[in-house]
Image: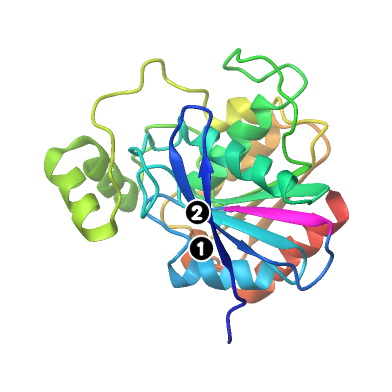
């Protein structure tokens, strides 16, 4: 498959972190922008993300970006906390370059960030008490999202916590995945995705999860979905594993079709 061309951009967050981004022009509707948020240790330059951007560009222009501490972006990863500012910069950029409708599509950590960001833009400003904001997404898709923090119930998640919490783990993430992780603990602990989900309405929410996800079992998807108010949908995908690497073109096309209809 020949991947669609993309054009580099540099975004600046509200807290002055420079974010590496790319714009893949639409091969379909020219008024829909799709902001693509990768998972932990991912990057817009990795082939799974580029492949997803290509498929989604059949439904709208795609803004992909590297979260802080990842790839060529500045700063350090806070693993889902301040990353809402990175996503906010990407959504604002999509509107600034002319997209009148914007959907946020996140995978794994990016899905948690997308849910928290949409809750922040809800009518009541979400559980963190930041107050409501303008300019949020018109629809949100959360793929393979964790519902709650500190989950260690699977071996892959125990490995993720080792990478985050241990000096050797942070070194390995920096050297092996170009991911720079901030040391220390959250203070305060940010709202969990399931808490933020209750504040997203009336923005449409789609929760997508695989029954073969090795990181987060299905109860995470159900917890987010049950906490959210209408309009919302839940897709449980048979045989689907985790996040970008397991996503098939067929699933991504269905997500693109959903975004066209629900923005």
Residue receiving disc 1: 244
- Would residue 224 be found to the left or right of residue 39 on screen? right
Residue 102 is situated, as x and y percent measured from the top left of the image, at: 75, 48
* Residue that protrudes farthest toward the bottom in the picture: 1
Q: Is residue 66 magenta?
A: no
Label 2, secondary structure: give it: loop
Q: Is residue 220 visible?
A: no
- Specify which label sits upstream in the sequence, 1 or 2: 2
Say which of 7 and 56 sits in front. 7
> Going 65% across and 20% down the picture, which residue do you hit?
126
Distance from disc 1 to disc 2, alpha carbons, whole Å, reads: 8 Å
Badge number at residue 38: 2
> Going 37% across and 34% down the picture, which residue do you hit?
78
Q: Which residues are magenta?
A: 31-36
1 w.r.t. 238: above or below: below
Residue neighbourhood size for the residue with mark 1, other residues' Cα within 10 Å, grouped as few (<14), some (14–19), many (≥20): many
Q: Is residue 32 magenta?
A: yes
> Going 67% across and 28% down the picture, which residue do you hit?
119
244 w.r.t. 75: above or below: below
């Amino acid at each position: 498959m020949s991947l669609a061309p993309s054009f580099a951009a540099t975004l600046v967050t509200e807290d002055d972190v420079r974010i590496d981004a790319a714009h893949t022009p639409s091969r379909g509707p020219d008024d829909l922008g799709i902001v693509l948020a990768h998972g932990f240790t991912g990057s817009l330059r990795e082939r799974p993300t580029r492949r997803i951007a290509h498929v989604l560009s059949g439904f709208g222009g795609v803004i992909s970006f590297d979260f802080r501490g990842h790839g060529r972006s500045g700063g350090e990863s806070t693993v889902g906390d301040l990353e809402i500012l990175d996503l906010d910069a990407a959504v604002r950029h999509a509107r600034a370059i002319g997209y009148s409708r914007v959907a946020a599509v996140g995978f794994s950590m990016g899905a948690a960030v997308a849910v928290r960001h949409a809750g922040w833009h809800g009518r009541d400003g979400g559980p963190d008490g930041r107050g409501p904001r303008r300019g949020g997404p018109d629809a949100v898709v959360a793929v393979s999202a964790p519902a709650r923090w500190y989950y260690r119930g699977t071996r892959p998640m125990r490995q993720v916590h080792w990478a985050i919490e241990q000096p050797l783990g942070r070194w390995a993430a920096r050297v092996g995945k170009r991911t720079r992780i901030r040391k220390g603990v959250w203070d305060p602990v940010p709202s969990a995705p399931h808490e933020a989900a209750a504040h997203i309405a009336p923005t449409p929410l789609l929760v997508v999860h695989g029954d073969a996800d090795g990181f987060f079992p299905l109860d995470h998807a159900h917890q987010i979905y049950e906490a959210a108010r209408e309009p919302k949908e839940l897709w449980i995908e048979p045989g689907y594993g985790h996040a970008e690497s397991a996503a098939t073109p067929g699933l991504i096309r269905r997500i693109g079709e959903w975004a066209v209809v629900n923005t």
